[in-house]
Amino acid sequence: MKKVPFSYDKLKNIVSEFPTPFYIYDEKAIRENVKNLKKAFSWNNCYHEYFAIKSNPNPYILKIFKEEGCGVDCSSKVELMLAHKCGFSDKDIMFTSNVTTSEEYALAKKLGAIINLDDTAHINFLNNCTGIPETICCRLNLGEDIMYEDKVTINFKNSKFGSTKEQIYDAFRKLQKLGVKHFGIHAQFGCHKRDANYFGDNSHKVFQYVVDLYRNTGIRVDFINLAGGIGIPFLPENSPADIEAISSCIKKAYDETIVKAGLNPISLFTELGIYMTGPYGYFVSSVLHVKKTYKSFIGLDASTNSFMSPARYNNYYHVSVMGKENKECNHVYDITGALCEDRDRFAIDRPLPYIEEGNILVFHDAGAYTYSHSYNFNGKLRAAELLLCTDGTVKMIRRAETADDYFATLIF
Ligand SMILES: Cc1ncc(COP(=O)(O)O)c(C=O)c1O
């Protein structure tokens, strides 16, 4: 059974101070998870996690990661600015962008970030914008189908990301001539999987490429960034990813390739997003109306503009009806918002306990790609964000949007 990190009484107190809808993040759980991740990868001396800002771009969250010794992964100018404002600099920023502007490269270079070239054809562009930094990374497109349980999970040949194996050989030779001293390879093959063997098998391919790269160019990389993609258990019956097992499968692959080829040590990096905050965030909303037609609809005081993942990706998000957690799920509801879009549903045909107006609903696993995906369709405003601090207090870490915010960009 999925649990929430607050009692119903505590939540009622929180709601009396901060009206629904809001996100609330569990600081203690986020910190514990980082510690476990770092412990699991401690076999690699310079292992570093660059938290993917795109998944949860709140300064308080970023500061937690900073305090826990993580860096950040940025993909745009504004994310770079946010990282800088939160005190990140130099090699604690990974700039993994694509279709990058000269302004973005210039800012990344100014902050001393590690620039991760999505397209090796950008070398001249980067050189003209800012000059070539001493440390650089290239994003590898493995150029093959990545399979899981007999299904293609990534069709790399169709992917817009990264450069081919051969393009990176040439790029590294060119970059070396241009003065690069430290090289890295980035490869994102994770796609929300929790199976340790998936990570072992695919990191083996990346490590083998690094060995081939050395044999072809004589260039030894300093770091390998395995990027993101460790998944979380959305369904109550799913078990969480076993990070120790994932790390030990990656270590086995590392030993069989990097160590065997005499290239040890190479630093391993990750830029995880959903694994870092997903399970530790909750979306809280109150029931405004109950409607019965051919189906029973629960109308919330929030719409999927502020939490769009259930509607757009049809993802299952577990719901707790607060105060009724132990009641029988003997009613079937669609949980909706107020958008003029029929797909505006947080849950469809969901068996739940009997729900009345005023009940408070908590959606689990809402800590990543939730607020950051929210939008303003129908003039609906974004929700607030709260932090459940380690000492049990609650603070608002982003206020709810107001109509003034909506009108701020309009010209009359
Ligand atoms: C380049 C890059 N790095 C890291 C991440 C984080 O991925 P995840 O949240 O699946 O861990 C993403 C997600 O889109 C990404 O595109």
Image (cartoon, rainbow, N blue to C red):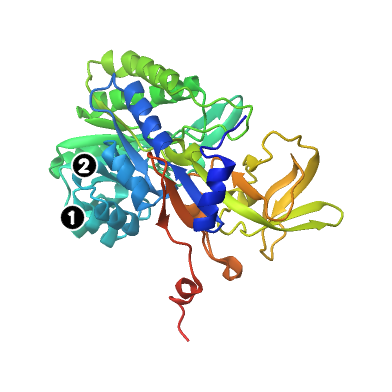
Q: Quadrant of residue 178?
A: top left
* 31 relative to 313, above or below: above
Residue 189: x percent and y percent? 45, 33
Q: Amino acid at mark 1?
A: Lys
Q: Quadrant of residue 265?
A: top left
**Mark 1 sits on what residue?**
110
Residue 193: x percent and y percent? 52, 30
State which image quarter holds ligand 1.
Answer: top left
Q: Amino acid at mark 2?
A: Lys
Going by the image, does 118 lie left or right of 18? left
**Mark 2 sits on what residue?**
91
* Residue depicted at 53% across the width and 44% down the height: 10
* Residue depicted at 56% across the width and 26% down the height: 148
* Residue depicted at 28% across the width and 28% down the height: 47
Q: CA distance from mark 1 to mark 2?
A: 12 Å
* 94 relative to 292, above or below: above
Label total for image: 2
* Residue depicted at 35% across the width and 49% down the height: 60
Q: Nearer the viewer, residue 251 or 36?
A: 36
Can residue 194 be seen here? yes
Q: Residues within 10 Å of mark 1 (few under 14, many from 20)?
A: few
Residue 217: x percent and y percent? 22, 30
Element type where label 2 sits in the image: helix
Q: Earlier along the polypeptide chain: callout 1 or callout 2?
A: 2
